[in-house]
Image (cartoon, rainbow, N blue to C red):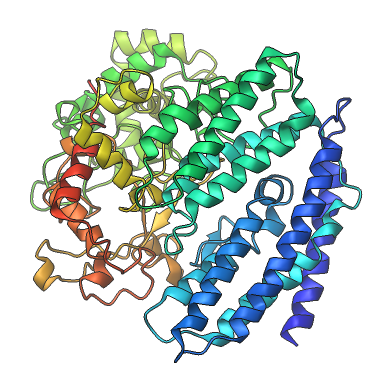
Amino acid sequence: MYRNRFKIFLQLLLFITCLSAVLGLKEGPDRRGLHRLTDEFKISSTRFAETTIELQHAVKLIDEKNPETITLAKNALRKSRLAYKRIEFFMDYFFPSSALIYNRPAKVEVDEPYMEYQEPSGFQVMEAALFDQAPRSKKQLAEQAEVLNTSAADLPALLYAFVANDQQILESIRLELVRVITLSITGYDAPELKSGITESYQSILTIKTILSPYLRRDQRGSELLLQHLNTTLSYLQLHPDFDSFDRMSFLTGYALPLQEQLSLFIKNQHLLLNSKSALNYEAKHIYSTDAILPEVFPGAAGRTTGMVSLGKKLFLDKSLSGNLRRSCASCHHPERYFSEDLKTSITFDGKGTVQRNAPTLLYSGFQYSQFWDGRAKSLQEQIKGVISNPTEMNGNHEVIIARINKSEYYKKYFLKYFADSAAQPISIGTIADALAAYIGSLSPRNSAFDRYMNGDKNAMKAKAVSGFNLFMGKGQCGSCHFAPLFNGLIPPYYKLTEYEVLGTPGNNDFNQAKKDMDRGRYDFFPISYYEAAFKTPTVRNVVMTAPYMHNGALKDLYQVVEFYNKGGGAGLGLTIPGQTLSAKPLNLSKKEVGEIIAFLESLTDKL
């Protein structure tokens, strides 16, 4: 019965995605790569389907009393994942709805704003079950294996009436390279199998295969690109061990130069297309300071340097508050990297504290929602809310507009920068726009780490480099704090902001941890999966912005890293049913903790 229902669902999904392909993909005059793409997909999808049969068989043989059968199932899962990596770029780019079946995170996700649940499915669910210390659900494993096998068998149907032009094909593989650089080498989708390096090899090998129709022996650009592909593949092949893999050497010596050459090649072929992501394809590589486009984020379009200057003056202006004693800088101190050294800020009346910690405003413009719980859709919406909030600035919008209108300076420059705002250049909307322009400009990207990644090999100390390797590897930090901004923007598209349930305690005594009662995003969206969920903040400049977490409970970075090292709240013994952070200890040594903190120190900007 389960199989029949799934087949009906799959057939409908395939029909919809194929129809989308026919209607949505623009026909291009140049399709050198189309035949290679479809031929490769036929071969690789067939091989993938064969591995799902093997996986299904291995699951059937699982005997809880025989560890060897579980090991065989893990190996079959690893083999199937490797085969899937040969078609991942195609599925994720051209048929994202169908791709959800195979490699979704092992947690329930909510499709906003429609509030539809997306149940976990595929590889990551099976990995979590196979490595879980609690009794495994063989039934769940069998169901997931059947889903993979049934859907894989029907993959060739995706090619019915499929069309794609060269720009789309090349964009799909350049995004796959970003996925390798930012996700695969961190173990993002295979943290227990630790197969990310060998999977990266398969992804790069596929990129090379798909590129072959475009490469000409008499073109220097082709020769250089092929050389970079081959050296990158060789490095991955020679260093397959996940824990010991030198990510910094791989990135700076191989992957980033490959990305740079691939971008240059696509540009020179006049096949540039950016239809999917927030990435700046004109940037040198993902760690360039201009790698992500600021204007794609809510409320960022149309900002000018003049608005930034006007917003900076408003940021320091106490006339925005109800008592003329408080400004934005009262809680987000520029000298403290736009944060505050209190657990939570003092309320407007001075008699209490607000609910949550005042985080840094640096890089806050690179988010799709604001506040810890993400309840504001833009910086402008957040600003309006803070100004009028009785516990924060307690300002009446009409009174504030009247005050600003009394200033000849403000009248002059609001009229200059907001001349198109009908007959009222000064309004709460334009005030919020100016402030958002300033806050959105707070993204210096000039830290020691940034200088190192852009060529200055003296910028970082060896300890910090080791810390980066741990952050992106064994420490699993980079699988939630995604490169290059190290916040919750999910690569390779950077179109979604992630929320996590960490089980952050209400105190910093890990031996007697107390549960924090803040319900997080649940208070905004009352869905059980959002219980105690918070937006993943950037860790850039984190050394300068203590105390930490949404409640300011952790006083220093040693406590923060140790909290993760112990497995979050569940690892501390708290009951956190929906924790999305693995409760398993990371087993980081004291030396390794110090190295991770050294890396975090290297993320400090010069203001």
Residue for point 54% across, 43% down: 179
Residue for point 23% across, 75% down: 574
Residue 316 percent coordinates (x, y): 21, 23
Q: Could you tell me how many numbered marks the image carries?
A: 0
Residue 174 percent coordinates (x, y): 62, 34
Name the side, left or right, on which 97 lies relative to 153: left
Instruction: Please tell me whether residue 63 is drawn above or below residue 219 in the rendered image.
Output: below
The quarter of the image holding the N terminus is bottom right
Q: Could you say which is closer to the camera, residue 263 or residue 393? A: 263
Instruction: Please tell me whether residue 457 is drawn above or below residue 120 in the rendered image.
Output: above
Residue 75 percent coordinates (x, y): 54, 69
Q: Could you say which is closer to the camera, residue 183 or residue 337? A: 183
Residue for point 20% across, 36% down: 463
Can you see residue 344? Answer: no
Can you see residue 230? Answer: yes
Residue for point 66% across, 16% down: 221
Which quadrant of the figure has residue 116? bottom right
Residue 196 percent coordinates (x, y): 48, 52
The quarter of the image holding the C terminus is top left
Farthest front residue in view: 238
